[in-house]
Image (cartoon, coloured by chain):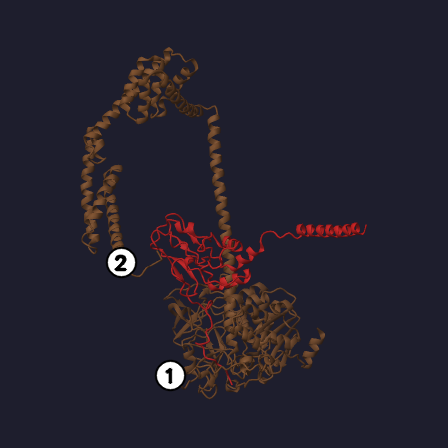
Chain colours: A brown, B red
Amino acid sequence: MESILERITRGHFWDFHGGIHPPEQKSLTSSKPIKQLTLPKQLIIPLQQHIGREGDLLVGIGEKVLKGQPLTLSTNPMVVPIHAPTSGTISAIKNSVIAHPSGLTQLCIFLDVDGEDTWRKRDVCTDIDQLTNNQIIEKIADAGISGMGGAGFPTHIKLNSKPDINFLIINGAECEPYITADDLLMMEQGDAIVDGISIIDRLLSPAFILIAIEDNKPKAIKALQQATANIEKIKVCVIPTKYPAGGEKQLIKILTGREVASGSLPIHSGIVMHNIATCFAINEAVRHDTPLIRRVVTVTGQALNKPQNVWALLGTPIKFLLEQCELEALKDESQPVIMGGPMMGFCISSELVPIVKTSNCILVPSKTEMPSAFDKESKEVECIRCGQCSDVCPSNLLPQELQWSAKAKDYPQLQKLNLSDCIDCGACAYVCPSQIPLVHYYRIAKAEIREQQQLDLKAEKAKIRFEARKLRLEKEKIARQEKHKKAAAARKAAMNKATPEAAGAKSAVAAALARVKAKKAASNTAVSVDKENKDAVINTGDDQKSQVAAAIARAKAKKKLKADNANKPSNTKDGEKADTTDKAVETKTVTAKPSSPDDKKAKIAAAIAKAKAKKLSQSTESVKVDGKDSVIDKPASQSEKKEKIAAAIAKAKEKAQAKAKDAALSGIDVQTKTRPTIPSNENDKNAPIESNVEPTPALDKKAKIAAAIAKAKAKKQLKDEQNDSSNKLSAQQPDEST
Amino acid sequence: MNIIIAILVLGSIAALFGAILGFASVRFKVDGDPIVEQLDALLPQTQCGQCGYPGCKPYAQAVADGEAINKCAPGGEDTIKKIADLMGVEVQPLDESHVQGDAPKSNRPKVAFVIEEDCIGCTKCIQACPVDAIIGAAKQMHTIIIDECTGCDLCVAPCPVDCIEMRELPDTIHNWQWDLTSIPVKQLD
């Protein structure tokens, strides 16, 4: 530990593998102050400007918002809110092109600026010592601060980590050509940055704080050295200029000589890194209650008349920035506009793309400056295996090998070659004499691997859910069987109980059993005793009740078989006479001799049987009489009351029919002419039967329902017809899909 | 005498190795057939049943038992190739008879979508879903949990009002793929 500090104080640093020295081009903007812009007319604020998920919307269309008012709500730690960069009215919330190489759209809030720039009520903190650490972190989270160096990781998560932090590294390397945003910020806001660093210092209490600045920024170094002159803990480290020294792992290697292992994070080795601009934003948020609503953007390139760093409100369309910096060839379609630096940036597809929390540079090169950006066609030729790419790779990878595997889509091999450690710095492509766009191949492969991983994850989840469902169905089945078993057991138990109901149920079962027994016995005895009786038995099977009645009458004469015969008609009856028949059978089977109570019972039974037979014959007659009529008419013949009801029903029927027809007709107007009759006929049958169950008040409703049904039916028929015709049309082409 | 000694020595060696092998077979016993697990891991886990088996695991078991390897329609050529590698058999073209509905025109993943105004709440699709990705109750409108849907197509057929259709997932920045042809190389000299 001591030796690291000694080396740092002596200005001796380690070196990382590889790296390049592209032309810096920083002088275009580094000598001019950061320009304050006038307010643009409209801001386009994407809901998601960082890694993670977008927050929940807090505002609606047409709402007036004040400067600094939160627009989204953070629902989990990976979500950072966004704020209104100035006051105005929300004119739309819709998808719009965002700062992404794909040119895809995402949900954005369109804010019409009112020009007054009215702040919401701010709660300026005069004494930071009165706040607890949690309050500070909450303030930072509420201010919507995410890493401003490029990746956009939510800052409050990085600040909420556990102690044992050895090094807090403030990244002011800004190694990519052209970009001077952090440089200018350090020059102009050195004190504020140091204040921000002291807030982080309080939260993380690291052993040492190192501010790393490349030696091509002498003014910034001077400014920060002055600002930190009184603070022992903070050391400004002037590191040699080399691209990509600003990479997290590369900078750690330069300053501490430690290498962060593949797949692990710097925090695991006790190192936390923050960007200069993030420190400034933290200070603004904690001390001045100013959320992250603006940032320094380097607008540069030789196609601009006035390249300059500007304070851009988040959501400012790039077109506005280009106008402010006087782009000569704004109308030129082929003019590439690059967001980010020349090494890692991407061409944006529309000039309406807004500035977001991570955009640090807009590069508009001229044709002589960067001819490759104007060339739409790749000049890629075969790899000549020169090996320069692996010489410059800052992550110690084998770019050439990676390239082969990426082209062959050999993803396992790519993972073996540690593609995930590639930081997309573009050094390999920069030095490649064959002009192979190596980084693009890696990006494609990375995206595919990531998608494959997501698919695998999803498949795993689907598997778990499938298994869980199978288990659940199995369980439900077992539970159902268990329930049935239990219910059966309960029924049995209830029957065996001595309560009167149980006895009743039991006797009913017993009676049923006895009836079956008696039937058997009767058939046996009938065979031996009487031929007529035999007929009777057979006839019961044939369900000719009148003959049964006759048989009963005959049986009356024969006392011996009385009970047996009486039981037969009761077969079809309810359990009312269960007791009587039961006793009769019992006496019969036990004593086999008729006794006086038996006699009486048998008579009653016979009488009942007679009555039944009579009724049956009557009903069959009536059926014969008006057998051709519908079923509804049958009860009508039985009594006058019923006739009246029938009349009412008939009336209702007519009414319903008329109504249904009307409805059907009106519904079918658009359809074919033959349709109405068929559904309304069907309706005739349906509606009255329904109204039979429920009398008149519900009739209207029923008619309506019937009409709806008729309509639906007609529609369906039409559809079917259409389908048929289309099927006929396509009949020539055999269609296997059915 | 010599022959007896030889028999005894060889016999005792045989008994020793027999004992070692017997012990090993008990001690290092492999539960289940690991090839089935490996096959199951290769299958796409849509649980769609298009192969004729009720889920991916049963098909994996069947393949291990000698079933044809070309019945997984959602997995497509990729899966067949992987299974062929694992089983050491020839790659076969996909058996078209196991493709339900239209053959996939693109590789874009699809999910089921309930046209909610047409749903009558019959719960038939809920019963058909192998991964419980449909929520709803009787006579209540149903809807699909997109994140859980495997795009297996099984809910489309049972719907009596044809209110379920398969839709491609939209392009977002999360599933977007770099395309070399559309992005010119932007390199600074």
Residue B34, above or below A306: above
Tell which residue pokes out farthest to the right in this image: B1
- In this view, the residue in front, B71 or A407, is B71
Residue A529 falls in image quadrant = top left
Q: Count how many numbered circles sit on residues in the image.
A: 2
Name the chain letter of the residue that bears numbered label 2.
A
| x and y percentages locating residue A475 in the rendered image | 50, 44
Query: Label 2, label 1: how many angstroms apart (C-alpha)?
Result: 56 Å
Residue A320 vs A507, above or below: the answer is below
- Residue B63 drawn at (x, y percent): 51, 56
Identify which residue is drawn at 27% across, 19% down.
A550
From the viewer's perspective, is residue B57 above or below residue A158? above
Q: Are marks 2 and 1 on the same chain?
A: yes
Q: Nearer the viewer, residue A283 or A575?
A: A575
User: Residue A419 at x, y = what percent?
Assistant: 56, 71
**Horizontal arrangement in the rendering, residue A274 relative to residue B21 (left or right):** left
Per the rendering, the mark at residue A728 is 2
Chain letter of the residue beneath label 1 in the structure image: A
Tell me if I can see residue A312 in this picture. yes
The spot of residue A268 in percent (x, y) is 63, 67
Residue at 26% across / 40% down in the picture? A690
Q: Is the residue marked by circle 1 packed among few (<14), some (14-19), or many (20+) residues within 10 Å? A: few
Q: Element under label 1? A: loop
Q: Which mark is residue A331?
A: 1
**Rendering quarter of residue A522:** top left
What amino acid type should be assigned to the residue bearing mark 2?
Lys
Mark with earlier residue (2, 1): 1
